[in-house]
Structure formats: structure tokens, C-alpha cells
Amino acid sequence: MIHNAKTDSPFLIINRAINMIPRNQPIYPCFRTPPLNQNNPCDYWKPPHPGWTKINADGAWDLCTNKGGMGFIFRDYNHNVLFAAALHSNIFSAEEAEVRAIWAGVHKALEMNIKKVMIECDAEMVINKLKGGDFDGNWCTDALLKDLKEWLPKFESFTFTYIPRVCNIAAHELAQWGKTSMLDMFWSIPPLWLLPFIGKSPLFRNLLPFA
């Protein structure tokens, strides 16, 4: 970005914006520190190996209204956020929300011509199903699963991994945002409200004065 004939990095600009927030004012309601589980071997997001892209995906579903949200975020081994999305749809089960989130992330990875992908999600049953090569679903997930079965061979390498919610907090917040706002949004630079939830990585820990 260019300002006053000077070129600054996006992260420097984000840091300046954060520092302009008054410290005695309530920050956006989503700014809260995710709890850590001391008995959990994973208490923050960990980067993929060099050459790989990690996609964290999550779904959200309201049983009473059938409002659903999907979120996914792409990051590389340097902790760089490559892409993030918050989506919404009418959903008929929690499983459908999770499958749709993974489906959307994989579809975007194909569009971006990413070759080596690690999918992480906190829906253990869905991840175990995909890891086991089971791409059969019910009336609301079968077509999505069949797409995944067709798409996965197009990548050089692809893995599915279950992680606890605390390690998937960025994708969780994106899914909740999509469900609540009922909007579809896409970012190549993470929005300000998401930064605390990717602040567990060393890169953003130094950018957040309140982390």
C-alpha cells in the first residue's frame, strides 16, 4: 500500500489501525481471548510444513432457524493469511454445515491452484469419515461429498486432520460471523475483528497490543 509516497506492508498498516483504537473504549464484541485447555496438547494454531497450505474450516448451525454459517481460512508456514471467507446458507444439520465449510475451502484451493493442502476441522466425525475415504452422505451432504471425492485427486498431496475447537478458533469465528450476519464475505487480508483469533501465532502476537 502507498501513502504519502511511502510503501508500507499491510501488517504495518493494520498495526497502526489497531493502535488508533482508544484503550478505554470497548473494542468490537468479537474481541475476546479464546480459553486455553491446559490438558490439551494443542492450545493454538500451528503452521503447516513449508510448501503446504493449511485450511482451517468450521461450520455453525442454528437448530431453531436453520440458519447456517461456514468459515475457512488459508495460512502458510510463515503464518501468513492467504485467504479467508465467511459464508451463509440455510442448513439442515450441523454435519451439513461442517461438510459445506470443507467443500468451500477445497473448492477455493482448486481455484487458487494450491497443490499441497492440509485441512483441519473440529468436527471429528466428519474428519474421520473423510480420512476413511467414505464419501457417501445423506440427501443434504451426498453431492458435496461426491464433489470432494472428485476434486481431491487433483492435488499433489492432501490430508484431513481433526483438531480441538481451541485450535480452530479463527475458522469458528468466521463461521459464526457468516451465520449471524447472513452475508458472504471474502478477505485476502484478515479483517480487524479476526486478528485476536489468529493472534496465537507469533507473527500476530507482536502486532496486537492487547493480546
Image: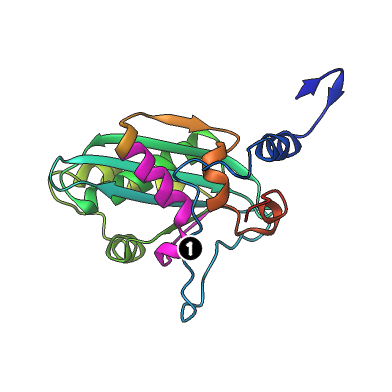
The location of residue 190, given as percent across then percent down, is 57, 38
Horizontal relation, residue 26 to residue 82: left or right: left
Q: Amino acid at mark 1?
A: Cys
Q: Position of residue 75 (x, y in %)?
A: 59, 49
182 relative to 50, above or below = above
Q: Residue at x 30, y 44 (%)?
A: 100
Label 1 neighbour load within 10 Å: few <14, some 14-19, many 20+: many
Q: Among all residues in the image, which is located at the extreme right?
A: 5
Extent of the magenta region: 157-179
Q: Is residue 119 above or below residue 108?
A: below
Image location of residue 21, percent across then percent down: 63, 37
Q: Magenta region, mostly helix, strand or loop?
A: helix
Q: Quadrant of residue 128?
A: bottom left
Number of callouts: 1
> Badge 1 is on which residue?
167
Residue situated furthest top in the rendering: 5
Residue 140 position within the rendered picture, expressed as x and y whole percent measured from the top left = 16, 43
Seen in the picture, residue 171 relative to 86 is either above or below; the reply is: below
Q: Nearer the viewer, residue 122 or 107?
A: 122
Display colour scheme: rainbow
Residue at the (42%, 48%) spot, across then down: 173
Q: Does the segment drawn in magenta span residue 5?
A: no
Could you say whether the residue bearing mark 1 is in a helix, strand or loop? helix
Q: Residue at x 46, y 56 (%)?
A: 169
